[in-house]
Image: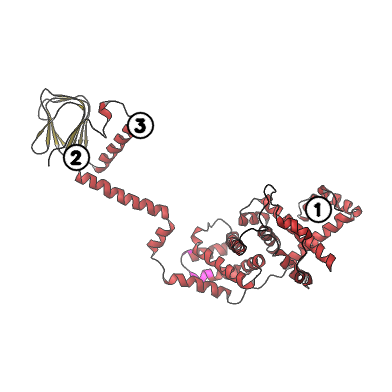
Amino acid sequence: MSDHIHHLINKVKAGDHDAFAKIVDLYKGQVYNICLRLIGIPAEAEDIAQESFIRAYTNIDRFETDKKFSTWLFKIATNLCIDYLRKKKPGASLDAELPGTDGYNMYAQLAASDPSPEEQVAASEMSDWLHAEIRRLPPKYRSAIVLKYVEDLSLKEISEILDIPVPTVKTRIHRGREALRKRLVRDRVKR
Amino acid sequence: MACSKPWRQLIEKVIDGEATAAERHELEAHMKTCADCRRHFHELEEVISALQSAEPAAPPPNFTEGVMRRIERPHGREASPLLRWLKRHPIATAAAFFIVLMTGYILSLWEQAPFQAVVNGSGDIKYENNRTVVVPKGEVIKGDLIVQNGKVKIEGKVQGNVVLINSRHLMASAGEVTGDIKEINQVLEWLWYRVKQTFAHIFFAVPSESSRSLTPSRLWMAPL
């Protein structure tokens, strides 16, 4: 698999467009799903997923062949999504870390007490409910949860994609799934 | 009521698959008696299995075509390979640019350098026709004599070095030079000499008259 990819990448570097189309076909599912789960709006997710491939294409010379291509590609996609989320939510944000609390923010405060919108509670399927809840997580927990459980990547890969150390990845996964668990319990009590 | 923190951490560890068999058994034993931890454990499992069971969404049709179309567009006005290379290697470009300018500058200095004789020290020199510098008989130059683009005739004494930059030495009579006679007739040699001089003046500046080359003690410029 990786030999095949590296072969295609070398062709792209030599100017072969069709080879890049093959790379897009191989990874479009994963890249699109990362974007969709992080952003939640299909049209926007498609746009950013396409943009990710275009960035990969224009920067293909910067890709070092001894690295894993998917990690590099997912990093581009994740960064674009996080940039998008940041731009969409300007100003004071619930994501802002409280000083001196190591990753604790206002979301964690809200999680226990804030009632969720009724439409989320009414979501019939567990997975619909869950994806709606993922989108309500702060982006840094959201990205860790999506890469870990939706894309099934290793902690090491996630750490490379998000540019954070493995222990921080773990902390974010723990906090993210704990927030989801609390919401699951709360919504169950309501129903 | 929530159970103690160490148990919660053990639950995380077991769920992450990082616990030892002994730790797993310990937790199982605990959960038999602690309903709260049991519920917490199962809720986490439920969240994770729901996350993992999510069906991946299919990418929209024509996704690949869309990407390829967006790639083709900028390639319609593709820059030349040289320009692309230059864009991709900004530091190399800057260095090459610098070297080209520097070379031109140095060459022009070399080509245009006028006839010039400088004494770094004390003593008088005279001029003859044809850009010739003469150290007259009986005259003693205490210091270095530097001649550029000319000829030099030493009839007296030079107690120091004689540096001839693109110049010739006409040893016509029994002149005496106590130091070296250096002839510099190549651009690179001349450049190296200049670099050495500059460094010597910056780092080993002797607070004497002879070292002040930026304001040489005596400077004669012959009309060309």
Of badges 1 and 3, the one in the foreground is: 3
> What is the C-alpha distance between the residues marked 3 and 2?
27 Å
> What is the C-alpha distance between the residues marked 1 and 3?
68 Å
Q: Quadrant of residue A94?
A: bottom right
Q: Amino acid at mark 2?
A: Asn
To the question of a shared chain for discs 2 and 1, the answer is: yes
- Contact flag, marks 3 and 2 (Cβ < 8 Å): no
Which residue, given by chain and number where applicable, does mark 3 sit on?
A: B203
Q: Give the structural element (helix, strand or loop) at label 1.
A: helix
User: In this rendering, would A182 be left or right of B66?
Assistant: right
Of badges 3 and 2, the one in the foreground is: 3
Q: Amino acid at mark 1?
A: Ile
Q: What label sits on residue B11 in the rendered view? A: 1
Q: What label sits on residue B166 in the rendered view? A: 2
Q: Which residues are magenta?
A: A13-20
To the question of a shared chain for discs 1 and 3, the answer is: yes
Q: Quadrant of residue B219?
A: top left
Farthest right residue in view: B33
**Marked residue nearer the N-terminal end (2 or 1):** 1
Chain hosting mark 1: B
Viewer can see residue B90: yes
User: In this rendering, would B112 be left or right of A8?
Assistant: left
